[in-house]
């Protein structure tokens, strides 16, 4: 049977092959974002909800077409403006259910 990370890699590869603009990696137990993710240049919607992420990877800036980023119910304490600023198309970030600091809460209201 497929290991857990293999199934994540498979999901990402399938999205890449099909040119799918939307990727759902919710509830996969991820503590870090897999390298393969950053090769999906055409991605517009990314769902990372319900994982175990403590921080967001700076390489997200490579996903320059990203419009929607869902990171609800993780363990994020801080969202960096420099991380989100290089994403010119970003319209919506949802980070409910995270222990975010005040500065991050403020940042989310400005997006």
Image (cartoon, grey):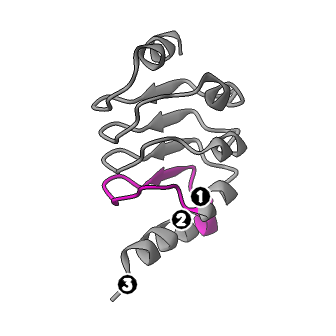
CA separation in Å, label 1 and label 2: 6 Å
Viewport quadrant of the N terminus: bottom left
**4 relative to 12, above or below:** below
Residue at image point 38% right, 81% down: 3
Sequence-first disc among 1 and 2: 2
Which residue position is annotated with label 3? Answer: 2
Sequence-first disc among 3 and 1: 3
Determine contact: label 1, label 2, CB under 8 Å.
yes
**Disc sitting over residue 12 in the figure:** 2
- Which mark is nearer the camera, 2 or 3? 3
Q: Classify residue 47 by image quadrant.
A: top left
Neighbours of disc 2 within 10 Å: few (<14), some (14-19), many (20+): many
Neighbours of disc 1 within 10 Å: few (<14), some (14-19), many (20+): many
Image coords of residue 24 (percent x, y)? 42, 53
Which residue position is annotated with label 1? Answer: 37
Q: Which residues are magenta?
A: 16-34
CA separation in Å, label 2 and label 3: 14 Å
- Which mark is nearer the camera, 1 or 2? 1
Residue at image point 71% right, 45% down: 62
Image coords of residue 78 (percent x, y)? 47, 29
Residue at image point 38% right, 30% down: 95
CA separation in Å, label 3 and label 1: 19 Å
Horizontally, residue 24 falls left or right of residue 73, namely right
Horizontally, residue 55 falls left or right of residue 73, namely right
């Amino acid at each position: 049977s497929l290991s857990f990370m293999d199934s994540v890699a498979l999901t990402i590869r399938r999205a890449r092959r099909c040119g799918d603009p939307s990727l759902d990696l919710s509830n996969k137990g991820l503590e870090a974002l897999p390298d393969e993710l950053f090769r999906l240049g055409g991605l517009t919607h990314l769902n990372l909800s319900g994982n175990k992420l403590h921080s967001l990877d700076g390489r997200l800036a490579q996903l320059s077409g990203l419009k929607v980023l869902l990171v609800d119910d993780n363990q994020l304490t801080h969202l960096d403006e420099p991380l989100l600023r290089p994403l010119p198309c970003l319209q919506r970030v949802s980070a409910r259910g995270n222990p975010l600091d005040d500065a991050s809460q403020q940042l989310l209201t400005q997006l």
